[in-house]
Image (tube, rainbow, N blue to C red):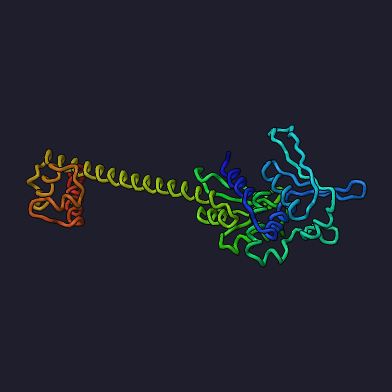
Amino acid sequence: MTFAAEVKKECTLLEVHKEHARAELTALIRMNGAVSIYQQHFILNVQSENAAIARRIYVLLKDYFQAESELIVRRKMKLKKNNIYIVRCRYRVHEILKDLEIFDNMQLNPRVSAEIMNSEPKKRSYLRGAFLAGGSVNDPKSSSYHLEIYSNYEDHNEDLCNMMNSFHLNAKTIIRRNGYITYIKEAEKIADFLAVIGANRAMLNFEDIRIVRDMRNSVNRLVNCENANLNKVIDAAQRQTEAIKLIEMKKGLAILPEKLQTMAKFRLENPELSLKELGEQIPGGPISKSGVNHRLRKIVEIAEKLVESD
């Protein structure tokens, strides 16, 4: 089971207050519902590829509206051969849609009602329904953090974004070819969203995985940094040692001033030491790191001039 599926399964098992369940049902029907007319009667079909979500819709309709509905299972024939679950309601459809403020004068109303927008518990429930209907979230083990909710309508997408940001989730919107997306990219904000919709077990799991992953990345960065620094020390020491050997072979170290001569001999004896360690251990020291660097740089310059003079 994917992480997104685990989140949705947890959401479908939550017990919520009747009024808050109404907000969740509103999102599910607005986003996944379709209305048709048969023999002068409205028929409501709410579709999902997730059996648990379909059961959730069925139960919410029954508990809140005492509406008799049926659960239909169909098999997809193209590409993914998953089952499609349809909750079909034939009775009191117009009353239900009007009560949920999905219908306004026989037209679809894409805006979320002020009643929901002005109530924190109802916003949480509506966002839970919206995530169940059109949401997805990357597994925290993957290479990037991403949570999104898809909507067919720009106005509705804007309301979803505003709802998320009322909880300080830093959500943003983007237009896709077939609709609109509200999304969150920050790991901490994704965890906060999961808490907002009541998926606390998934939130804790997400945080556990994220913390371990971030710690591993931090350790890797430190190791890489240490390796890079070590390589720099080795390369510099090799360059300095070669310069000292060149001077010794061509003119002898006696041509160097006393301080440079002492440094050259000590570097040859200790090619593995860093500049700081050289300064701390050199006879007649200690010498500052910048002082050691200055002397070794002078030695390299003298070797380069000897090469140029040949």
In percent of width and height, residue 86 lies at 76, 42
In percent of width and height, residue 123 lies at 65, 61
Left or right side of 109 for 129: left
**Residue toward you, 103 or 16:** 16
**Residue toward you, 205 or 67:** 67
Q: Is residue 104 visible?
A: yes
**Residue toward you, 90 or 63:** 63
In percent of width and height, residue 178 lies at 71, 48
In percent of width and height, residue 20 lies at 67, 59
Please report the residue visible at 17 percent of the width from the left and 44 percent of the height from the top.
306
Figure quadrant of residue 52: top right
Please report the residue visible at 74 percent of the width from the left and 34 percent of the height from the top.
75
Please report the residue visible at 64 percent of the width from the left and 51 percent of the height from the top.
131
In the orientation shown, which residue stands out farthest toward the right? 39
Numbered label tally: 0
Left or right side of 186 for 296: left
Figure quadrant of residue 286: bottom left
Quarter of the picture containing the C terminus is: top left
**Residue toward you, 6 or 109:** 6
Left or right side of 264 for 158: right
Quarter of the picture containing the N terminus is: top right
Please report the residue visible at 49 percent of the width from the left and 43 percent of the height from the top.
141
Q: Is residue 157 visible?
A: no
